[in-house]
Image (spheres, grey):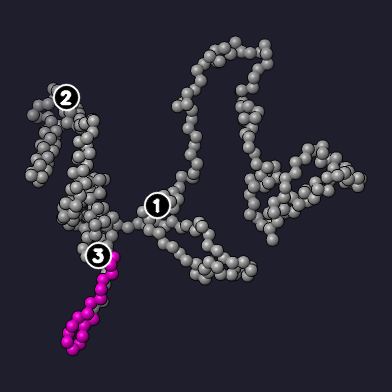
Amino acid sequence: MKNPAPEIIEMAPSEFEELLRRAEQGAFKEGDHAKIGGVLKAYLYVLELLDKKSTSIDRLRKLLFGATTEKTADVLGREGSTPAPKGDQAPNADADASAPAPTAGEEKAPKKPGHGRNGADDYPGATRVKVIHQSLKPGDACPECGRGKAYEMADPGVLIRLIGQPPVAATIYEIQKLRCNLCGVVFTATPPAEAGAKKYDASAVSIIAMLKYGLGLPFNRLDRLQDDLEIPLPASTQWEIVSAGAPAFEPIHDELIRQAAQGDKVSTSRMTTTAASAIRPSARGSSHPAWWRFQEVRRSRCSSAVRGMRAKI
């Protein structure tokens, strides 16, 4: 049975030496027995903790000396802040006193606690699998002591496992088929519900669109990545998938345009001005390669804008 933590008895060194002297002479006073008993209990408690090898140095320090509620710098003052005696003040003391105090914005922000690693709560999109104990359930007798009962703890143990997979994964369902050897009727097993009715799930349409239009990953690059991971997804197929799923996103696109129209500020790109100004005025002739490149980019962008307008019409 684990002994309770003993009460901390605070004694000055002189008082402790006086207690030892009275103990050697056998002349105890009232209260000496309680102090000696407290010291012996604390000694036995510390031995028990050390025997279990589960006590840290910090815990022993708090047990023996109590938890500190004040910092040394706050009690004794920081280095260089000790006031000088009268008559020994430096000549520039008035100048230091008149110096402006640091503002709140200039003070160093306190360091946020944490170890920099992500916990289980930082993975809201992860799949959670509940693992049940193989041989115990809540309410069973403790197999260690045989007297207590096991109960389920509020905080379960957590293991986080991250796996690599293609951006678009594939699952092959091998559906069993049975055929009668007399009439030839074929009996096919019912696919599971998670198989769905379409080859390309809505999540596949979303991830392809996000990679292309959200992160700027070209279709041919995703095609190469998928092929390297042995889940082929040609660039032409990607375009067909996104094109077929585009109507579902049109209400969102229209709403974004409506909300953007309510803005008070309009930001425009200065890329054309920057590209034109990068070419020297004397070199803006028809024979300069950079000028031809600039004209090519501008024509390409204008053509893309016209095609987009025709598609909407």
Q: Which residues are magenta?
A: 178-196
Closer to the camera, 205 or 281? 205
The quarter of the picture where residue 142 lies is bottom right
- Quadrant housing the C terminus: top left
Closer to the camera, 103 or 296? 103
Residue on which disc 1 sits? 123
Q: Is residue 225 above or below residue 295?
A: below
Residue at 61%, 27% in the rendered image = 78
Residue at 77%, 40% in the rendered image = 11
Q: Is residue 127 visible?
A: yes
Q: Is residue 307 visible?
A: no
Q: Amino acid at mark 2?
A: Arg
Q: CA distance from mark 2 to mark 3?
A: 60 Å
**Image coords of residue 10 (percent x, y):** 75, 41
The quarter of the picture where residue 180 lies is bottom left
Q: CA distance from mark 1 to mark 2?
A: 52 Å
Dot 3 crowding, Cα within 10 Å, few <14, some 14–19, many 20+: few
| Left or right placement of residue 178 versus residue 64 in this view | left
Closer to the camera, 156 or 278? 156
Element on which disc 2 rests: loop
Q: Earlier in the sequence, mark 3 or mark 1?
A: 1
Residue on which disc 2 sits? 280
Residue at 27%, 62% in the rendered image = 170
Element on which disc 3 rests: loop
Residue on which disc 3 sits? 196
Q: Earlier in the sequence, mark 1 or mark 2?
A: 1
Element on which disc 1 rests: loop
